[in-house]
Image (tube, helix red, strand yellow):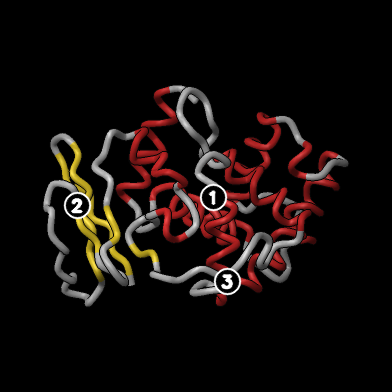
Amino acid sequence: MNSTRRDFIRQISLASGSIMFIPACSGYGSVWRFFTEAEAKTVIAFAEQIIPADKDPGATDANIINFIDKQLVGPYTRFQEMYRKGIPAIENSAQKLFQKAFHELGFEVQTGFMVQMEKGELPEEFWQETNQSGFFRLMLDHAMQGFYGSPRHGGNTNYVSYKMMKLDYPHVMGQNRYVSKCAQQPLPASPQGREKELINAPGQTIEIYYS
């Protein structure tokens, strides 16, 4: 991935709420918990478009698919129906436009497909039960959460995103208690009652809130 795209990913992750509110949860068992094998291939390909690997780790390295799969049988059960309807809509659209499954498309073709999806321009016949731009945003948010959140939620394996950004690694201290290497003590709850984790980087402090 070139520096412009990597900077873009970093900027939207810090500016949006996608990494700010990540529910705390416990383990749920082995893969796959929610997705079918075919559905997982679609989500993996989508996530790789959002955060492709180059000299730095990408979506697969961070195990984003495991994060999403895990959350969908835990705190994100409310999004199950949207995934069940949205993934077939993606696949039906890909088949109509290119006669291939989404994960089989070339990288640039996938990019163009996702641009259309974000704009709501894919064949409407397959999107009667869910909003394509809304589903695009949901999957984008979940990919970002899986890449930048704590590994305890299923993604960001070995803190790959923190290493990439040269950030401090947070440490879990008991149930839903976090400590920064710099702070060396549990952090207080936010005004909204959420546990707060501070990630210290040169010239800035990033806040991540856990429900």
In the image, farthest residue toward the right: 99
- Tell me the quadrant of the picture where the C terminus can be found: bottom left
The amino acid beneath tag 1 is Ile
Between disc 3 and disc 2, the foreground one is: 2
Could you tell me which secondary element the residue under label 2 belongs to?
A: loop
Say whether residue 39 is left or right of residue 77: right
Q: Residues within 10 Å of mark 3 (few under 14, many from 20)?
A: some
Cα separation between marks 2 and 1: 23 Å
The vertical placement of 101 against 134, above or below, is above
**Residue position for label 3:** 79
The amino acid beneath tag 3 is Phe
Could you tell me which secondary element the residue under label 3 belongs to?
A: helix
Could you say which disc has been placed on residue 180 in the image? 2
Foreground residue, 131 or 192? 192
Tell which circle, 1 or 3, labels the residue nearer the N-terminal end: 1
State the image quarter where residue 166 is shown. top left
Foreground residue, 139 or 156? 156
Could you tell me which secondary element the residue under label 1 belongs to?
A: helix
Cα separation between marks 3 and 2: 31 Å
Tell which circle, 3 or 2, labels the residue nearer the N-terminal end: 3
Foreground residue, 145 or 81? 145
Image x and y of residue 180, in percent: 19, 52
The amino acid beneath tag 2 is Ser
Residue at the location (67% across, 31% down)? 107
Could you say which disc has been placed on residue 64 in the image? 1
Say whether residue 88 is left or right of residue 118: right
Residue at the location (71% across, 71% down)? 129
Residue at the location (58% across, 41% down)? 60
Image x and y of residue 151, in percent: 42, 53
The vertical placement of 180 against 75, above or below, is above
Foreground residue, 125 or 110? 110
